[in-house]
Image (tube, grey):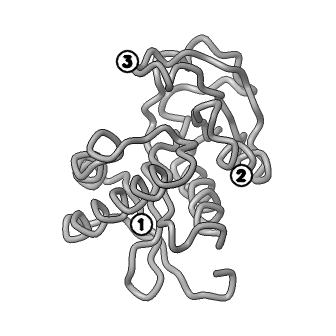
Amino acid sequence: MMDTIFKIEAGKMSDITELEKLYDDLNDYLEANINYAGWKKGYYPTRVVAEKGIKAGNLFVLKIEDRIVGSVILNHVQETAYAQATWGIEAQGSQVMVIHTLVTHPDFMNQGVSQKLLAFSKTHGLALGCKAIRLDVTIQNKPAIALYEKCGYSYIETVDLGLPYAHLKWFHLYEYIL
């Protein structure tokens, strides 16, 4: 994908059906292979997640030839457990960009889609005057952890996000200082 022309733009309501299909295709892929993320079709991510992100203006899509192949939600919403962490930089909530629901369509995995969305997250965060980007990732999601570390994110600590799912108890917190 490195030579492929792509564009990243704010998601639109007209993208909802395609985003829902991307989420479903990804969850089907995870179910059939190794579900590192622990996501489940019909539970997360869903059409409602995309609708909320688009309405809030913080869901972004990566398109190749007008096909959505990746997406990310960027906002300032930190999980309650983030307050327990000793972060690398002190920042008010509005100075922290938080990455949520970073997804790549299975047909485009290992082609740099997530890296492009992470790079966009940095640019977007800087444009909004943020001091840091933060995220959480389940401890089982080895591919995502490797990606974040490759992209310069620093491990902060492991926390319980308090989710009601036994398989999603422990999460690593990561930070990228802008």
Quadrant, the N terminus: bottom right
Q: Earlier in the sequence, mark 3 or mark 2?
A: 2
State whether residue 13 is above or below residue 33.
Answer: below
106 above or below 67?
Answer: above
Q: Which residue is mark 3?
A: 164
Q: Secondary structure at mark 1?
A: strand
Query: Relative to the observer, which residue lies in front, 22 or 86?
Result: 22
Q: Is residue 57 above or below residue 6?
A: above
Name the amino acid, label 2.
Leu
**Drawn side of residue 150 relative to residue 51, left or right:** right
- Earlier along the polypeptide chain: callout 1 or callout 2? 1
Q: CA distance from mark 3 to mark 1?
A: 29 Å
Q: Which circle marks residue 61 in the picture? A: 1
> Dot 2: few (<14), some (14–19), or many (≥20) neighbours within 10 Å?
some
Residue 147 tag number = 2
Mark nearer the viewer, 1 or 2: 2
Q: What crowding class fits label 3: few (fewer than 14 Cα within 10 Å), some (14-19), or many (20 or more)?
A: few
* Residue at 70%, 41% in the rendered image: 176
The answer to which of 127 and 63 lies nearer the viewer is: 63
Q: Amino acid at mark 1?
A: Val
